[in-house]
Image (spheres, rainbow, N blue to C red):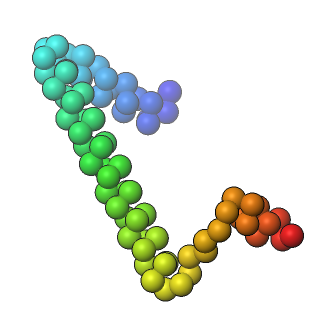
Amino acid sequence: MNSQTSYFQDAIETVEKLPPDDQMLLVEIIRQRLSEQRRAEISRNAQATLKAVREKRAHFGSVEDLRRNLTGE
């Protein structure tokens, strides 16, 4: 067992020692934080896309245009 697996197993065992209500609260907190992280990632991607559009580095077209661009046709 590597240290990552051991750390993960230790975390699970620690959570299992909590009362059920606390376990549910912890799950909800983790879900909320993951949602916040995902929203932040989406926001960063959107900002990068807007910057590329402003700088005229973004390309627009159909899926067929993309295929032609990628295959060099």
Report the residue that reaches farthest toward the top. 20
Q: Quick one: quadrant of the C terminus?
A: bottom right
- Give the residue at the far front of this rendering: 62
- Indicate whether 7 appears above or below 36: above
User: Is residue 67 found left or right of 26 in the rendered image?
Assistant: right
Horizontal relation, residue 9 to residue 66: left or right = left
Rendering coords of residue 12 (x, y %): 31, 23
Q: Would you identify the image quadrant in which residue 23 lies?
A: top left
Q: Looking at the picture, how far across and down is residue 62, in whole percent?
A: 67, 63
Q: Position of residue 37 (x, y in %)?
A: 31, 50
From the viewer's perspective, tell me whether residue 41 is left or right of residue 23.
right
Q: Nearer the viewer, residue 69 or 11?
A: 69
Q: How many marks?
A: 0
For residue 17, what is the image quadrant?
top left
Asked if 65 appears above or below 34 in the picture, the reply is below
**Is residue 40 shown above or below 5?**
below
Query: Nearest the camera: 66 or 17?
Result: 66
The residue positioned 56% from the left and 76% from the top of the image is: 58
Q: Residue 70, can we see it?
A: no
Q: Residue at x 25, y 43 (%)?
A: 33
Name the outermost residue toward the bottom.
55
Is residue 53 found left or right of 41 in the rendered image?
right
Examine the rendering and report whether any part of residue 47 can be seen.
yes
Q: Quadrant of residue 15?
A: top left
Question: Looking at the image, which residue is at 19% across and 21% down?
Answer: 24
Percent of width and height locating residue 47: 38, 70
